[in-house]
Amino acid sequence: MDHEINRLIATNQAIAELIAREGDDESNARIVIAFGHPLPVSKPVEAALAHHSEGSSIKGSSPGIGEVEIEEGEKKREYSYGTEKGRVGNYRLWKPEQGVICFHHFWASDLTTAADEKSLPPTYYLGYNPKTMDLTFFGAEEDHHWFSLGWLHVFRVHLKVLIGERKRTFLHVYLRIKN
């Protein structure tokens, strides 16, 4: 148990250092790669469903007690599909494809917790060679362009590569149903 806690703390610190140094830190990149490499590759589509219902109350009277009100609290149900984002300290980490690890701050980090699509935290991309575990690129989301049609959100991420080279962009598809 202590080993796993120390590993999470070290990975959290390594991610913070990578962001601060804009990826120019081979030793911290190796720590994040060692942690993220065994993660399963995410599905190409991420879906989130959040259902919130108001609470209700029942009023009545009872002999000997008087007026009674019973309140039922708000009900929340949330479901997700596609991307398994693991929590590592202050960050969420996932693997969109073999050889790429993504991470961002956990606060308001998905479509069900963000105030709007533009308030999502920046996502960082760490590319590596799966055979040698060497860093191949490090980049940050420069911007993303949304196309929204009700509950369907599609965005294309433009990646600002800070270290190394990445030739293609990322396309993310989010299905969001919120009521």
Image (cartoon, grey):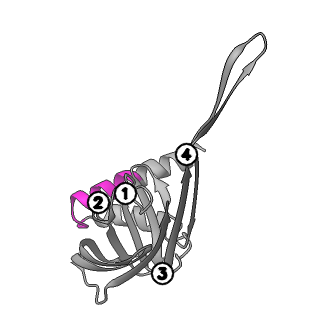
Assess whether mark 2 and mark 1 are in contact (beta carbons under 8 angstroms): yes
Which numbered disc flags the more N-terminal residue, 1 or 3?
3
Magenta region, main secondary structure: helix
Q: Which numbered dot is residue 98?
A: 3
Residue 72 versus residue 123: which sits nearer the camera?
Answer: 72
Assess whether mark 4 and mark 1 are in contact (beta carbons under 8 angstroms): no
Which numbered disc flags the more N-terminal residue, 4 or 3?
4
Q: Nearer the viewer, mark 3 or mark 2?
A: 2
Element carrying mark 1? loop
Q: Which residue is mark 2?
A: 119
Label 2: few (<14), some or many (≥20) within 10 Å? few
Q: Residue at x 48, y 81 (%)?
A: 98
Q: Which residue is mark 4?
A: 54
Q: Nearer the viewer, mark 4 or mark 2?
A: 4
Q: Which residues are magenta?
A: 12-24
Label 4: few (<14), some or many (≥20) within 10 Å? few
Which numbered disc flags the more N-terminal residue, 1 or 4?
4
Q: Residue at x 47, y 82 (%)?
A: 131
